[in-house]
Image (cartoon, helix red, strand yellow):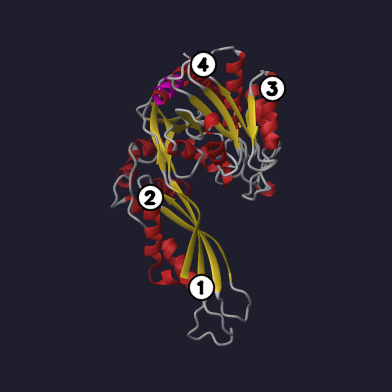
Amino acid sequence: VTSPTSDLLQNLIRNACVNDGTEASGEESRNCNTLRTLFNDCAADVHVHSKVDGRENLVVRLEGSDKDAPSVMLLGHTDVVPATASDWDFDPFGGEIVDGYVRGRGAVDMLNLTSAMAIAMSNFIASGAAPKGDIVFAAVADEEAGGQYGAEFLVSDYPELVNTDFVITESGGLQMPHNDVTYVPVMVGEKGVHWAHLDIEGTPSHGSKPYGTDNAVVTAAAIVDRLHSYSPSATFSSHWETFLNAMGVDAELVEKLAHKDSVDEALARMESDQASLIHACCHTTISPNVIHGGSKVNTVADHVRLSVDMRSLPGMTTKDVEAILDDILGEYRTKVDISYTQHEESSESPTDTFLWDVLADTSRSLIGECELFPMIAPYGTDARFFRRNGAVAYGFGLFSPAISFNEHISMFHGRNEKVDLESLNLTTQMFENVLRRFAE
Ligand SMILES: [Zn+2]
């Protein structure tokens, strides 16, 4: 059945706050205004701030009665990544409900959660409950392009509005049955994100006499090959085998995937979707993704810019990442000028916390016996800004069994995003239960 959460999600999808990484994109003011109306209706004190016009962020902060009581924030982002309509089976910004699913860009990343958080918060306010610790809902812009107009901006310019002891944001919360146990992942950490431009120099000369020239395109080709071949040994997070089992990997493969010596051979035997996720969860990765260079067809290239996306495992520093890149470049290093446009270390929260227990309790009350397990996301989220400041931050929703973990993961930035109405209800109830626990 439809609900306030599904209605809100439809509206947020239709607002099409598409963030393509440019400053002028996103236009999250549209989703901000939709949410502002919701909170104005329940007479909440709404704060709206932006670093640039059009990229508005909304924060509702309820002050608790006890300064020593734990505080919590529900943190959603309001932007979505671009969608090419011709690749989809339906209008990515139609926000239609068909066969019990809300369909459109953002239905899983993460307007579904943002909607559920907003409805849970407005219901909490409407109930007149008086929180003990501070309770915050924040809907932020620009998560999909690094957060400089969103979470990062609020943390630096409005810390009094967004600092809390605990934070819940994307993703996690899928039901993953294995051997009569329902496992539910909580995203407790994420890999580091390091984006670098490699400016590769050559010496210009006439294209009619290439012999012995210093051609930046040729150097770039050799460097791309090395980056692509980079293959560090695997590092496994805690609960690694639980994660593999919960994903439905064959027992024999699980055994191989849990050992450094056999993991590569096992990955090569798996389907590429599952293999790429498992590989990313246990390796530092490098992907050379953009290349521009040369000037003219009859001139030996004097410059190429290669942009690479590196993702580091927990425990690695930015210095470690720089050393890896230098090492891969080897003798080419002197021809390359490296500039990092994003250089963020991984982050991880502990699991022996009040919030973990609250999530476990509320999950059991809503879906029955289940076991939460910690997972490290291979991608970055806004949680890192808050972990860096000392908060415990988890990614969590609560989904029905209608969509499998693998299917869910494949929809992030993918085609045909959709979420079932039951999952929206479960997620909304879960957030409401969390807020009530923090109010006790
Ligand atoms: Zn997201």
Residue at x 42% of width, y 47% of height:
345
Q: Are marks 3 and 2 in contact (CB under 8 Å)?
A: no
Q: Nearer the viewer, residue 148 or 412?
A: 148
Residue at x 52% of width, y 22% of height:
135
Return the residue at label 3: 40
Q: Residues within 10 Å of mark 2 (few under 14, many from 20)?
A: some
Q: Is residue 400 visible?
A: no
Magenta residues (range): 356-363
Q: Nearer the viewer, residue 407 or 387?
A: 387
Q: Position of residue 359 (x, y in %)?
A: 44, 24
User: Which badge, 3 or 2, is on the more N-terminal residue?
Assistant: 3
* Residue 201 marker: 1
- What kind of element bears circle 1? strand
The quadrant of the picture occupied by the N terminus is top right
Q: Is residue 328 left or right of residue 151?
A: left
Q: Residues within 10 Å of mark 3 (few under 14, many from 20)?
A: few
Return the residue at label 2: 317
